[in-house]
Amino acid sequence: MTNPKYKKKLDDLLLICQKSLPRVDESLIRRAFDFSFNAHRHDIRASGEPFFDHPYAVAKIVAKEIPLDDVSVAAALLHDVAEDTEYQVKDIREEFGDTIADIVDGATKISDIFKSHDVTQAESYRKLLLSMVNDIRVMLVKFADRLHNMRTLEYLPAEKQRRLAKETLDIYAPFAHRFGLANIKWELEDLSFKHIHREAYDQIARDLKSRRREREHYIRKFSQPLERRLRDSGYKFEISGRPKHIYSIYNKMIKRNKPLEEVYDLFAVRIILDTEDANDCFGVYGIVSDIYIPNPERFKNYISVPKKNGYQSIHTTVVGPDGRMVEVQIRTRSMHEVAEKGVAAHWMYKDNVANVDPELANWVSWVREIFETAAEGQVPTQQLMESFKLNLYQDEIYLFTPKGDLKILPSGSTPIDFGYEIHSKVGDHTLAAKVNGRIVPLDTKLKSGDQVEILTSKNQSPNPDWEKFVVTHKAKSHIRRWIKEEQRKVIDEGREIWEKRVKKAKLNISEDELVRFVRDKKIDGTMELFLGVRDGTVDPDELIAQYQEEQKHPSPSGQEESRIDGLFNRFISTARGVSTSIVLDGSKDNFMHNYAKCCQPLPGDDVVGFVTTGEGIKIHRRSCHNLQSMRVTAPDRIVEVHLPAEGGTLFVAGVRVSGDDRPGMLNDLTHAISTYQNTNIRSVTIDSDDGHFDGTFIVNVENTDHLSRVVEKIRRVQGIRRAERFEE
Ligand code: MN
């Protein structure tokens, strides 16, 4: 090498290799450099520059942007030798051995495909994939080659520009995506777009430029409080405004049918954490969503479920300052590496043996299989290509029943998902699954094009373990429902055992009485009791004996049947104020009396009294259902009473509330209640599920009027669908 300009170029390339590659055979790079320089010495590019500048630039891209190994860099230097010079693949084979010669051969063949105009696109796909499955480095060299050609496209005639741009957009960009080469994919897309829709491209580029200052200012404003909190929490991180790509902006405009301004308004920020612990990303997400309100629909967790190309990150969209939407990506440094280098981060060559990420290897072997089994001409090329496009952007997979019906499922779906997709009964009774005629494990991840047959059996039922690997909502909810039903059956069995023992002891324990009793025994409700009885952890006979013992020393509380909520019971005895007097049959007197727990009468209610033995008169609401049976069994003990509106005495009342669950709902409700005449809330239970909630408020009120005003206040809270007094 005599030319000092090229001596410098070689040194630059070696330096890049040293920096970005794990191990560099310098002499290999030198020899490839010299060989290529010599072979191309007479050739000139369309731009008028020496042709060698092209393979050199491609080698630099491979070394810097898709850093894999020194073999790829050498192959990149040599990739056009067999195509454009007096040398052939066999010369490279002699000089550099089989591996490099095969890569160069593969890359040359791909170029040949595109030169002959009568080949269809599908055919190109086919050849591209075939060469790729032999050595993935062929594709990396081709990506770099195409990228450099696209960067220097303006020197070619307009017609050729458009053809190459379209080909790049249709074939190379999707492949780059599948390989996880995000930056290369974006650049290929933007460059293609520029040559296909020049005007739109220029317009968006101009707009982006003019808004740059404003954008940077806003990103700073957004980031500052975040950075402070992250630092205070001890995170080491890098936060940056993420440039939006012109082609993706254009696509968003088209897809969402929105004007430029609205699409630009979507700002994007990326947080890269210097940590090995993926959980830190969730911690950081917590801080982000603490400062800015997140849109739960835009939350994507690609950390727990990485994309097919290995991409991992958390994506969220939050409401930033001034109400603008900001997309935030959160990932660790190593996740970022994968996002940038894609396949190269997975595909490590050690001693020339590919050490491959199994997920990607599976995909590649599937590609190989399809092409090897699909004999030429048998599969329509158009169909083949469609099937590939599906697999390049695989958020969905396309599956077939044995009869050939198409089912579309999210990627990652298993035979169980497929079964539930056909019918819930098929899912529930899945015994085994055949994929393409072979029995497979039920957690097998299905691939586009798979033919799936579900074998069912009446005796088969869902396995709770299925819930861990199914991905569709349908399958998940059916499995959960089944588990719940199964639990209920077990509880019923326990109840049956319990009731037999109670009967044997000649006892009659009401449900309400039982609730109180088990709570005293520190058992968490009757359900726990029945479960315990069934699996033997609770001895029913021992409990019954205890119950009988307690019956001999009865508590002052009434024995009458009531079916009120157990929760209600807890607060009732303490909260109930002692009433001073009632008006009985028109004459005011101090009768011993108390209030029925079943219907919770308040001053203002239409009430009647029931004369009990030993407890005086028990006051019921006239509408009380317990009273209905007493009217039949002991009509003579029912007396007309009148409760005077007593000032100052507080009564307990319950309000049942239901509505749409939302952040701050409980707070708004308690606020609405307590701000009305300082109404005291004694207890709250809230049960929320799937955006819906049911709640019970136990409050202190003076009378029915007070209560209905509280209910009215509750009804006015946003999102409340029902609010009414607790009956029964
Ligand atoms: Mn080239």
Image (tube, rainbow, N blue to C red):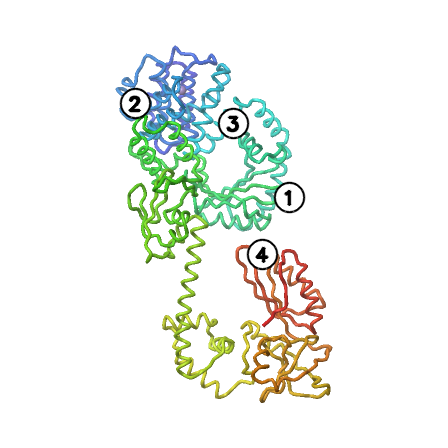
Mark 3 or 1, nearer chain start? 3
Q: Which mark is residue 321?
A: 1
Mark 2 or 4, nearer chain start? 2
- Which picture quadrant has residue 452? top left
Q: Are marks 2 and 4 in contact (CB under 8 Å)?
A: no
Q: Which mark is residue 190?
A: 3
Point out the frontmost of discs 4 and 3. Answer: 4
Q: Which residue is mark 2?
A: 101
- Which picture quadrant has residue 201? top right
The residue positioned 66% from the left and 78% from the top of the image is: 607
Residue 599: x and y, percent? 61, 75
- Placement of the C terminus among the 4 image quadrants: bottom right
Mark 1, Cα crowd under 10 Å, few <14 / some 14-19 / many 20+, is few
Q: Are marks 2 and 3 in contact (CB under 8 Å)?
A: no
Q: CA distance from mark 3 to mark 1?
A: 30 Å
Mark 2 or 3, nearer chain start? 2
Is residue 171 shown above or below 587?
above
